[in-house]
Image (spheres, rainbow, N blue to C red):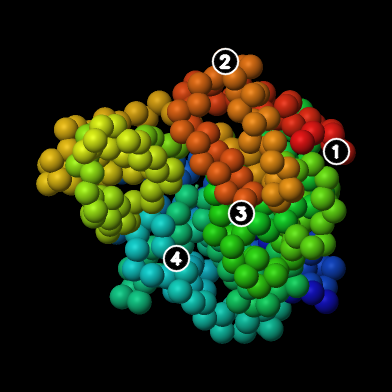
């Protein structure tokens, strides 16, 4: 008998028929003799709908009230799934994040999990219940409902699996597993049977939304056996595991595109110690994540500093940057939300110095201009015009022959 955490995403619980189908799958696992905790997302596009509803009331809602509202989506699906399981004769009980002891930092919209008190869930499992756990939500020490960031139900599932020392965690979604690129953008993308935690973490952080990045971090931390698979068929999906268990093939394991990006530039910044520190500390204080940073030498005594943020943070970032620009005597601020970041990821890149050049050539041949570049040991990212993101992903996928299983030939 194993202890299994399963997670079903929004599409998988998109209507009552799909919920009943999920209930049957969960019931089968229980019938096979396993203990099951099942985490679910809000139904379909419910969370987007709630965001829009709040926007009708305010264009600058209180983060606390927004979290209170967004957390309701998952409460609907847990109640319905628990009931659907009971209809099948399976004892099941729904719990909110708070009831399941998921304690987070007091940060709204993207709260890190501080700790999990799994006492109640363990008791329920011992009593034979399937525990149906609301994804995406927790509670701060002061009792405020928090959410874990968009796509955060994956993180609920993995963090709970870690807390329970579950045997494994299965993330059921609307694709068969993790592919070499988003299969909806690059139709010839190929499914990985397995991928390393590090590569998956990069892919997820760079826009492959199939897994929430923090879920991969938690899984890596405790070496959890994590699988992504389809809720619509019985395929075995993709296993995410430690790199030493993997055979290296293509130096690139995937292409990701992130359309939720925007670029800001602060112009003619006086060239003196402390200006970058001032700018980026102010952004950090506002909880704005900065990604690529480029400082270009402009004249003898001034520089331009350009950087990217999530588009959803652009308005807040702009107001921080305007203030700093005035303080330090910069000549102006410009912003551009019409960008996307395309990236390649692969642990094998370290030994293949030509990898970045292959990516740049693919973009050049497709007539796509590169605006910014950043690299690390296992990734290369380029900022490009947003309307070319799909072309870019397809061209890069082709250049690395990612649709083929074994590609040992390039530099
Ligand atoms: P869920 O609601 O189940 O959490 P998501 O929409 O969050 O599902 O994530 C699944 C989606 O991720 C897929 O439908 C697919 O379009 C997208 N995706 C992006 N990159 C990849 C990739 N490399 N492999 C698989 N799916 C990907
Ligand atoms: N419902 C939340 C969202 O849409 C969390 C999730 O689906 O994982 O972002
Ligand atoms: Mg998701």
Which residue lies under the disc numbered 1?
408
Residue at (72% x, 56% y) in the render: 196
Could you tell which of marks 1 and 4 lies nearer the N-terminus? Answer: 4
Q: How crowded is mark 4: few (under 14 residues within 10 Å), some or many (20 or more)?
A: some
Front of the two marks 3 and 2: 2
Q: Distance between the residues labelled 3 and 2?
A: 30 Å
- The quadrant in which residue 285 appears is bottom left
Which residue is nearer to you in this view: 149 or 352?
352
For residue 395, which quarter of the picture? Answer: top right
Residue drawn at (23%, 55%) of the image? 274
Residue under label 4 = 112
Please state if 225 lies on the left or on the right of 220 as rendered. Answer: right
Q: In whole angstroms, how far apart are the C-alphas of marks 2 and 4?
A: 41 Å
Could you say whether the residue bearing mark 1 is in a helix, strand or loop? loop
Residue 53 position by quadrant: top left
Q: What element carries label 2?
A: loop
Q: How far apart are marks 3 and 4 (CA)?
A: 16 Å
Residue located farthest toward the front when viewing the structure as drawn: 300
From the top left corner, tell me how far across and down residue 86 is, in percent.
67, 64
């Amino acid at each position: 008998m194993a202890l299994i955490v399963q997670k079903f995403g929004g599409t998988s619980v998109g209507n009552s028929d799909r919920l009943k189908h999920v209930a049957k799958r969960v019931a089968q696992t229980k019938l096979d003799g396993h203990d099951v905790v099942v985490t679910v997302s809000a139904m379909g596009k419910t969370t987007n709908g709630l965001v829009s509803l709040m926007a009708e009331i305010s264009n600058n809602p209180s983060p606390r009230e927004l979290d209170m509202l967004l957390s309701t989506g998952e409460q609907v699906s847990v109640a319905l799934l628990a009931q659907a399981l009971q209809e099948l004769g399976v004892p099941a009980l729904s719990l909110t994040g708070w009831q399941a002891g998921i304690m987070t930092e007091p940060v709204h919209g993207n709260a890190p999990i501080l700790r999990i008190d799994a006492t109640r869930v363990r008791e329920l499992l011992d009593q034979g219940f399937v525990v149906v756990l609301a994804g995406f939500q927790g509670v701060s020490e002061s009792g405020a409902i928090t959410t874990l960031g968009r796509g955060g139900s994956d993180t609920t599932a993995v963090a709970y699996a870690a807390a329970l020392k579950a045997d494994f965690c299965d993330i059921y979604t609307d694709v068969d597993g993790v592919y070499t690129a988003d299969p909806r953008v690059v139709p010839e993308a190929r499914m990985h049977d397995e991928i390393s935690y590090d590569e998956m973490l990069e892919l997820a952080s760079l826009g492959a939304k199939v897994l929430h990045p923090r879920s991969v971090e938690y899984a890596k931390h405790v070496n959890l056996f994590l699988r992504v698979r389809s809720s619509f068929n019985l395929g075995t999906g993709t296993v995410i595991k430690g790199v030493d268990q993997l055979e290296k093939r293509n130096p690139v394991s995937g292409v990701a595109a992130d359309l939720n990006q925007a670029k800001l530039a602060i112009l003619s910044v006086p060239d003196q110690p402390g200006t970058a520190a001032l700018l980026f500390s102010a952004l950090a204080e506002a909880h704005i994540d900065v990604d690529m940073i480029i400082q270009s030498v402009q004249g003898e005594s001034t520089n331009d500093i350009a950087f990217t943020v999530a588009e959803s943070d652009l308005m807040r970032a702009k107001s921080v940057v305007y203030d700093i620009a005035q303080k330090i005597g910069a000549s102006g601020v410009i912003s551009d939300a019409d960008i996307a970041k395309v990236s390649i990821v692969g642990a094998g890149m370290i030994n293949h110095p030509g990898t970045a050049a292959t990516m740049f050539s693919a973009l050049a041949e497709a007539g796509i201009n590169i605006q910014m570049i950043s690299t690390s040991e296992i990734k290369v990212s380029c900022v490009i015009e947003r309307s070319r993101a799909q072309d870019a992903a397809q061209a890069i996928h082709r250049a690395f022959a990612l649709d083929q299983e074994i590609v040992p030939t390039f530099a």
